[in-house]
Amino acid sequence: MVLLFIAELAFAFIIAGIVANFLEINAKREQIEYFRYAQEFIQKSVFEAVFKIKHSEEYVRSVIGNCFESPLHREDYKITYEVECFSEAEAAHYDIDRDAYVKVIVTASYKARNMGPDHQSFPTAYGIPYRPGKLADITGMKKLKVGDKKFKPEAIVKFEQTIVGSGHSSEKVYEFDVPTDPGEYTDVALEVHLIKELSDNDAFGFRRPTVGSTIRFINRTEHILDFGVTPRSSAMLRETRPQSQRSGEWEIIGPILPFDSVILWWRKPHPGDAETIPETQRSRMPLEIPSEESDGTQDRQATDSKESDDGDSEKDVSL
């Protein structure tokens, strides 16, 4: 009797263990399925879950892909526009009206930071519009420095791709890589020459997230010019230097997102502008051109002829 009772009790324990194990397996399966569902829901509806706003999946994927998944950030972006007149000899050579067209020298520098866990070489592209004919030789990227590597003009030309359009829609595109280690910075500096009209504008866009931007304009022409900056971004613009001379400086406060842009404009005033343009938007500029010491462009003209071992070096881009 006792043995029979022990056998039945042991059998009951076995059955109970099997049932408990089955229930545990089902519970784990249900838990795993729940977590998988929750994960998929958050991935698809992260903005809805956090902000209680339901955007389309296509919109969310675009925001994540262009902003959050970009491992390269740019910091301390500085860009300077210097507008100059053609000399009489240049105007005769290029058959151009020096009172209608100007040369624009653009110098830019920034720090590229790798926010990812691995070493990466980030592809970078600059598109520069140009006018066909003789003026095409003036327009283009003239200097480039990536990290410690300084490129000669013949090396920069290898990065160039020409896209021929109709009228003035032709473009020179320069593509090069920016190698950066995780968490480290790579300094990038370049100089570009443009041909613009005396009353014109230039729009430059941002393909990478950028934090900290400074824009500067210097008028070296014989003309009085009104000028200003119009950001196409949610970031705020602050004037950091009063426009009491032939130059102006602005700072963009806050991050600039990919595909945001900034428009820098300048134009020769017309009669009646004083009545139509608010005083805060006008640039009262004397005829004296600022000295090299006062505007800092001496740095652009001072170059270092030391070459690197790879043979692709050029004079230092001092920005």
Image (cartoon, helix red, strand yellow):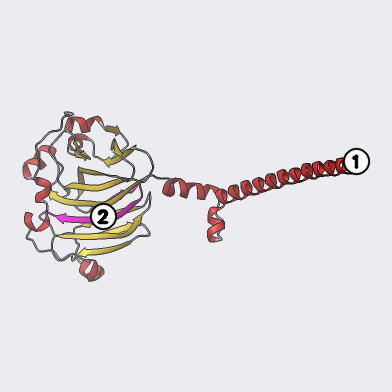
Residue 103 lies, in percent from the top left, at: 16, 46
- Taking the spot 40% from the left edge, 45% from the top edge, the residue there is 70
What secondary structure is found at the residue carrying circle 2?
Answer: strand
Name the residue carrying label 2: 264
Left or right: residue 218 versus residue 211 is left
Left or right: residue 164 versus residue 317 is right
Which residue occupies the foreground of this view, 93 or 213? Answer: 213
Magenta extent: 203-220
Magenta segment includes 63 = no
Question: Label for residue 318?
Answer: none
Residue 119 lies, in percent from the top left, at: 34, 37
- Taking the spot 20% from the left edge, 69% from the top edge, the residue there is 274
Residue 142 lies, in percent from the top left, at: 18, 38
Name the quadrant containing residue 118.
Answer: top left
Q: Disc 1 versus disc 2: distance between alpha carbons?
A: 97 Å
Classified by dominant secondary structure, the portion drawn in magenta counts as strand
Q: Amino acid type of disc 2?
A: Leu
- Taking the spot 20% from the left edge, 52% from the top edge, the residue there is 80
**Mark toward the viewer: 1 or 2:** 1
Q: Amino acid type of disc 1?
A: Leu
In the picture, the quarter occupied by the N terminus is: top right
- Taking the spot 24% from the left edge, 56% from the top edge, the residue there is 214
- Mark closest to the chain's N terminus, 1 or 2: 1
Name the residue carrying label 1: 4
